Image (cartoon, grey):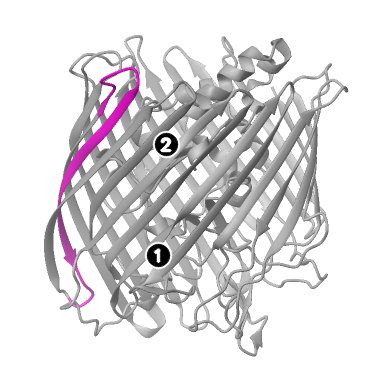
C-alpha cells in the first residue's frame, strides 16, 4: 500500500542515516524491515510515478518467511490478504481483488491465471525468492496483457545473493521444526561462479502431520508434503550482456479435503482424496546490465504450468499453461527519463482430461501486444508515467468456437511533491482484458460462447505520503471495475473499492508499523459474498496489521511480534452469516551469535493465544453449510540457518 512506496522507502533510509551508526547498521530492518538500497537497485523504475503504490517485500522480510508460506511473505501488509491455510490452497487478494486478475510473473515468465478453483493457481515456495513487488490497482503497459488490476512480480534468488564478494562457491542450509503438525523442513542452497558464469541449485523438503486448530481439533487433510526445487545458470560478459536460464518446480502430493480449500461442506466432513499438484516455471532472458543510450534491448521467453491430478472419483486431470515472450527496448532520454517500448506474445491454455471416462476438453487463447510506457521527471517535484497497449486476441473454445477481439489500453500516473514532507499522487487506467480461460475442472462441452465479450477493467487511485521525521504516514483511495467478467455460467460486472492507511515510526534499533485496509466488493452493482465474486474478489471488509521490532542489549538478539486483526463484517442477503472479527498475536526472537555471524537462530510463536479462526481471505465463512479451513492453533517453530 501507499506507505511502502519508493518515496517512503527513501525517506526511511534518510531517517536511519540520521539516527547514528547503530541505526545505520540496521537500516534494512527499520520501519518496514526493508532494505531501501537493495530494493531500488533491483528495480530500475523504483523512482517512477507508476511505482507510487507499489509494495516491496525486501530481504529481511523474505528471510523470515523462507521456512513459512505466502502468508508469512506478506505479513504486516493489510492490503495484501492471503487465505487458504495451506500452500496448495493459498490465494492472494490485493485491495480485495483476486490475483487471478493481475499480471503475475516469475523471473519474467508470465504465470497462469486459472486453475481448479479449490486450489491456488500460483503456489510458490518463499525460500526461492529474493524480491516480491506488488503493483496495486494501476499497472503500466509493459506489465503485459491481462494485468487488469495491477501486477505481482516474483524474482528468485541468484548466485550473487548467496555468495560474498570474491567467493567462488558457497551456500546455506536451513532447518526448521514446528510442533503443531510436527512439521519438519530442510532446504539446501548451493551456488558458484567462475569468470562470467554463475550457477545456483536449491532443494527443499517439508513433511508433517495434520495440524490442530485453536480448539485443539485436528484438521484432517492439512499435513505438509511439499517438494520444491530451483535451478539457475547465467553468463554475464564484461560489457554487461547477461543471459540467464531459470527453472523451478513445486509438488504437493497428499490427502486433502474433498474440496481442498474447505474444511467440509454440508454434512460431509473429513471426506478426503488425493490432490497431486505440480507447479513449474521456466524462463530464458537477455538484458544488458550496463545498458544506456537509445539502444538497450532485452528479451524474455517463458513457460509456466499448473498440473492438478485428482484420481478419485473421476480420474480428473487439469493442466493450465502459459507460453510467453517479450522483446523490449528502453530509450534512455537522460539520467532520469526513459521510454520502454516493445511487443509481447502469450499463448494460454486450459485442459481437462479423464482417460477413464474418455473426456478431453481444452480452451486456448493467443495474444499479441504492442506497448509503450514513458517514465519522466519533468521537474524536481513532478514525476509522470503514462503509456498504452494494443492487443489482438484469438480465443478457441471447447467446441471449436473461434473468437477474435482487439482492444487498446491506457494508463497515467503522477506524483507531485507539494512540500518537502508531503507528496500527492494518483493514477488512472483502462485495460483490455480479452476473454479469460475458464477453470478447467468446470469445462462443459455444450458451453455457449455466443454471449462472451472481452472484459475491460477501469482503475483509479488517489493518495499521499507524509514524512515527519521518524514518523511516516500514507494512504490512498482505490477503485477497480471489471466489466464483462467471465464466471462459470455467465458474465457480470465486478467492483472493488476502498482505502488503505499506514504509518511507521522508527528509532535506534527498532520500529513500529501499522497498516489498515478496507475493501468492499460488488457484483452487478450489489454487495457480494464469496461465491458471487469467486475468482475475482473476496469480501474482506476491514483488516489491519501491527508489527513491532527491537534490537536488545544482548548483542545479536532481536525481539519482535505482530498483531493481525479483522473487524466484524456485515454480509449481503445472499450469505447466511456475517463475518466475525478476530485478533491473532505472533511473536519471535532471533539471535545471531557474535562469534558465529554465519548462524541465525529463530524462535517463533504463531497464534499465541490459540485463536480458532479462518483468515478473512479464506473462502466460505459466510455460509452455514461450509466449514471454512481454519488456521493452525498455537504453533512453536524453531529454525536455524547456517551460511558457508
Look at discs 1 and 2 and give the one toward the viewer. 1
Which residue occupies 51% across, 67% down?
539
Q: Main secondary structure of the magenta part?
A: strand
x, y (%) of residue 335? 29, 13
Which residue occupies 24% across, 52% down?
431
x, y (%) of residue 190? 59, 29
The tally of labels here is: 2
**Lateral position of residue 252 relative to residue 177, left or right:** left
Span colored in magenta? 375-399
Toward the viewer: 639 or 31? 31
Which residue does the numbered mark 2 point to in the structure image?
A: 246
- The residue tagged with tag 1: helix, strand or loop? loop
Q: Quadrant of residue 105?
A: top left
**Lateral position of residue 175 relative to residue 480, left or right:** right
Which residue occupies 77% across, 26% down?
599
Toward the viewer: 210 or 566? 566
Which residue does the numbered mark 1 point to in the structure image?
A: 536
Rounded to the nearest whole Å, what is the CA distance between mark 1 and mark 2? 30 Å
Which residue occupies 29% across, 79% down?
490
x, y (%) of residue 181? 77, 60
Q: Quadrant of residue 590?
A: top right
Q: Quadrant of residue 576?
A: bottom right
The label shown at residue 389 is none
**Lateral position of residue 402 relative to residue 136, left or right:** left
Amino acid at each position: 500500500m501507499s506507505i511502502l512506496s519508493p518515496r517512503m522507502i527513501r525517506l526511511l533510509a534518510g531517517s536511519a542515516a540520521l539516527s547514528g551508526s547503530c541505526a545505520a547498521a540496521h537500516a534494512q530492518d527499520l520501519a518496514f524491515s526493508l532494505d531501501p538500497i537493495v530494493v531500488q537497485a533491483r528495480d530500475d523504475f523504483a523512482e517512477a510515478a507508476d511505482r507510487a503504490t507499489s509494495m516491496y517485500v525486501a530481504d529481511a522480510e523474505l528471510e523470515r518467511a523462507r521456512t513459512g508460506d505466502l502468508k508469512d511473505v506478506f505479513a504486516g501488509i493489510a492490503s495484501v490478504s492471503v487465505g487458504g491455510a495451506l500452500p496448495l490452497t493459498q490465494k492472494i487478494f490485493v485491495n480485495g481483488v483476486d490475483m487471478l486478475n493481475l499480471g503475475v510473473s516469475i523471473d519474467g515468465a508470465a504465470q497462469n491465471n486459472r486453475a481448479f478453483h479449490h486450489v491456488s493457481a500460483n503456489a510458490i515456495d518463499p525460500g526461492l525468492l529474493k524480491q516480491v513487488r506488488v503493483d496495486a490497482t494501476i499497472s503500466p503497459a509493459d506489465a503485459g496483457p491481462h494485468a487488469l488490476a495491477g501486477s505481482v512480480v516474483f524474482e528468485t534468488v541468484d548466485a550473487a545473493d548467496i555468495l560474498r564478494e570474491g567467493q567462488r562457491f558457497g551456500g546455506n542450509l536451513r532447518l526448521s521444526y514446528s510442533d503443531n503438525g510436527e512439521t519438519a523442513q530442510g532446504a539446501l542452497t548451493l551456488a558458484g561462479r567462475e569468470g562470467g558464469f554463475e550457477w545456483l541449485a536449491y532443494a527443499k523438503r517439508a513433511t508433517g502431520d495434520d495440524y490442530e486448530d485453536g480448539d485443539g481439533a485436528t484438521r484432517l487433510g492439512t499435513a505438509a508434503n511439499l517438494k520444491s526445487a530451483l535451478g539457475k545458470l547465467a553468463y554475464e560478459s564484461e560489457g554487461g550482456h547477461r543471459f540467464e536460464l531459470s527453472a523451478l518446480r513445486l509438488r504437493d502430493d497428499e490427502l486433502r479435503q474433498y474440496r481442498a480449500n474447505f474444511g467440509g461442506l454440508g454434512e460431509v466432513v473429513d471426506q478426503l482424496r488425493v490432490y497431486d499438484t505440480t507447479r513449474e516455471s521456466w524462463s530464458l532472458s537477455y538484458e544488458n546490465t550496463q545498458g544506456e543510450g537509445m539502444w538497450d534491448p532485452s528479451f524474455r521467453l517463458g513457460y509456466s504450468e499448473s498440473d492438478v491430478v485428482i484420481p478419485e472419483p473421476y480420474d480428473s486431470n487439469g493442466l493450465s499453461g502459459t507460453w510467453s515472450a517479450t522483446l523490449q527496448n528502453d530509450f534512455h532520454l537522460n539520467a532520469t527519463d526513459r521510454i520502454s517500448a516493445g511487443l509481447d506474445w502469450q499463448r494460454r491454455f486450459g485442459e481437462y482430461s479423464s482417460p477413464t471416462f474418455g473426456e478431453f476438453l481444452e480452451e486456448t487463447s493467443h495474444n499479441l501486444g504492442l506497448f509503450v510506457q514513458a517514465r519522466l521527471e519533468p521537474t524536481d517535484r513532478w514525476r509522470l508515467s503514462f503509456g498504452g497497449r494494443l492487443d489482438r486476441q484469438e480465443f478457441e473454445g471447447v467446441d471449436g468456437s473461434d473468437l477474435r477481439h482487439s482492444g487498446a489500453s491506457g494508463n497515467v500516473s503522477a506524483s507531485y511533491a507539494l512540500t518537502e514532507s508531503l507528496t500527492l499522487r494518483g493514477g488512472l487506467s483502462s485495460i483490455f482484458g480479452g476473454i479469460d480461460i475458464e477453470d478447467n475442472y468446470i469445462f462443459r462441452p455444450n458451453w455457449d460462447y455466443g454471449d462472451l465479450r472481452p472484459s475491460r477493467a477501469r482503475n483509479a487511485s488517489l493518495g499521499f505520503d507524509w514524512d515527519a521525521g521518524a514518523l511516516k504516514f500514507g494512504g490512498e483511495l482505490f477503485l477497480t471495475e471489471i466489466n464483462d467478467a467471465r464466471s462459470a455460467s455467465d458474465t457480470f460486472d465486478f467492483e472493488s473499492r476502498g482505502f488503505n492507511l499506514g504509518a511507521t515510526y522508527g528509532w535506534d534499533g527498532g520500529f513500529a508499523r501499522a497498516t489498515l485496509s478496507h475493501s468492499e466488493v460488488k457484483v452487478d452493482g450489489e454487495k457480494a459474498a464469496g461465491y458471487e465474486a469467486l475468482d475475482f474478489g473476496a469480501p474482506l471488509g476491514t483488516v489491519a496489521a501491527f508489527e513491532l521490532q527491537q534490537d536488545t542489549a544482548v548483542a545479536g538478539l532481536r525481539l519482535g511480534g505482530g498483531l493481525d486483526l479483522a473487524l466484524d463484517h456485515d454480509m449481503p442477503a445472499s450469505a447466511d452469516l456475517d463475518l466475525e472479527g478476530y485478533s491473532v498475536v505472533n511473536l519471535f526472537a532471533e539471535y545471531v551469535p557474535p562469534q558465529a555471524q554465519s548462524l541465525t537462530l529463530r524462535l517463533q510463536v504463531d497464534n499465541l493465544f490459540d485463536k480458532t479462526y479462518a483468515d478473512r481471505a479464506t473462502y466460505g465463512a459466510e455460509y452455514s453449510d461450509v466449514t471454512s479451513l481454519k488456521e493452525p492453533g498455537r504453533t512453536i517453530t524453531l529454525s536455524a540457518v547456517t551460511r558457508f
